[in-house]
Image: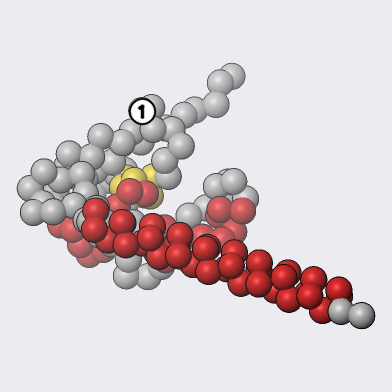
């Protein structure tokens, strides 16, 4: 007999993650506790009255900061995600970059000027380190060549 597979879909509007399209995604079960469930659904901009309390609904990992929002993240990650997910108390979905109605994405892309300065700084540090090493080698050769 074949193992029963559950179809997961993210409850966040405009999020297209499902267990078929994105099988590597982690789906977190929305709590069954009425009060907590209502908070989660409102956070995801879903009407709590439109979804039965008995309906199993899920929210994908894209809407969480998994390392900071899970109690057992290290164990979960090290065990190839085969361990039950335990979310920290009071955590609700809070990342919604998939929504079109957002004024800006969750994390703005870095500005070009910043990236250019960052690259220049890295190059300068590498050149300084290289010249320091060259000077150290030259000094060492001068010391060893003395009679």
Residue 67, given in percent of the width and then of the height, sits at 45, 61
Question: What residue would you read off at disc 1?
Answer: 21
Viewed as shown, does residue 128 lie left or right of 97? right
Which residue is more in the foreground, 35 or 59? 59
Q: From the image, which quarter does the C terminus lie in?
A: bottom right
Give the vertical position of 139 relative to 102 (above or below). below
- On-image quarter of the N terminus: top right
Q: Residues within 10 Å of mark 1 (few under 14, many from 20)?
A: few
Give 105 or 42, whichever is nearer the viewer: 105
Q: In this view of the protein, which residue sits in the foreground, 64 or 84?
A: 64
At x 86%, y 74%, the residue is 145
Residue 71: image location, x then y, percent: 48, 66
Taking the spot 8% from the left edge, 54% from the top edge, the residue there is 103
Number of residue marks: 1
Q: Is residue 145 left or right of residue 34?
A: right
In the image, taking residue 70 as reference, residue 131 lies left or right, namely: right
Q: Residue at x 55, y 26 (%)?
A: 3
* Quarter occupied by residue 134: bottom right
* In-front residue for pair 99/5: 99
Q: Is residue 147 visible?
A: yes
Regarding mark 1 in the picture, which secondary structure is present there?
loop
How are the residues colored? secondary structure
Q: Is residue 95 above or below residue 6?
A: below
Residue name at image x 46 percent, y 29 percent: 5
Quarter occupied by residue 18: top left
Q: Is residue 14 above or below residue 48?
A: above
Q: Residue furthest top?
A: 1
Q: Position of residue 102 (x, y in %)?
A: 10, 51
Q: Where residue 57 sits: x, y (%)?
A: 29, 44
Residue 32 visible in the displayed image: no
């Amino acid at each position: 007999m074949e193992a029963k597979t559950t179809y997961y879909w993210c409850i966040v509007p405009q999020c297209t993650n499902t267990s078929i399209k994105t099988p590597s995604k982690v789906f977190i079960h929305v709590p069954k506790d009425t009060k907590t469930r209502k908070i989660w659904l409102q956070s995801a901009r879903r009407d709590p009255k439109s979804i039965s309390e008995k309906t199993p609904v899920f929210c994908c990992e894209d809407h969480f900061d998994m390392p900071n929002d899970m109690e057992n993240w290290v164990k979960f990650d090290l065990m190839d995600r085969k361990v039950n997910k335990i979310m920290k108390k009071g955590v609700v979905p809070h990342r919604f970059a998939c929504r079109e109605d957002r004024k800006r994405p969750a994390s703005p892309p870095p500005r070009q000027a910043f990236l250019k300065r960052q690259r220049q700084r890295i190059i300068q540090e590498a050149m300084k380190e290289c010249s320091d090493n060259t000077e150290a080698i030259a000094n060492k050769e001068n010391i060893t060549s003395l009679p």
